[in-house]
Amino acid sequence: MSTIEKAAARLASRESQKSGTSEDAAGAAVLDAAELLAERAAKAAALQPSVSRAAGLRYVEIDLEALKARGFITPKAGRSQL
């Protein structure tokens, strides 16, 4: 069990003690936390740059247009105060 799952289980057990519910609520909270982590991991994987390996060489493709849209300075951005 990961640290985050342990923390979610502790929070759920504290809530169940306060409200007097059974451990089913704690188990449901752990499952909800696990689903949330899986969803966040999928989103993070989608944001990773595409990497392909050809003949042992490493190649990383960076989407400069997306970076420019998010406010980062790119080679074609023109002049800036930096």
Image (cartoon, rainbow, N blue to C red):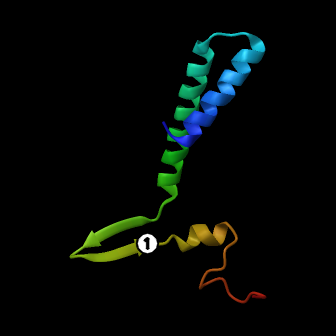
Q: Toward which corner of the image does residue 78 lie, by quadrant?
A: bottom right
- Residue 68, percent from left and from top: 64, 72
Q: Please indicate whether residue 59 sits to the left or right of residue 69 in the image.
A: left
Amino acid of disc 1: Glu
- Residue 51, percent from left and from top: 37, 67
Residue drawn where x is 54% and y is 40% of the image: 37
Q: Secondary structure at mark 1?
A: strand
Q: Give above or below for 65 relative to 37.
A: below
- Residue 54, percent from left and from top: 24, 73
| Res 79 seen here | yes
Q: Please indicate whether residue 12 sits to the left or right of residue 32 in the image.
A: right
Q: Please indicate whether residue 64 sits to the left or right of residue 13 in the image.
A: left
Judging by the rendered image, the residue that carries numbered circle 1 is 61
Residue drawn where x is 65% and y is 67% of the image: 69
Residue drawn where x is 41% and y is 64% of the image: 50
Crowd rating for badge 1 (residues with CA inside 10 Å; few <14, some 14–19, many 20+):
few
Q: Give above or below for 15 relative to 2.
A: above
Quadrant the C terminus occupies: bottom right
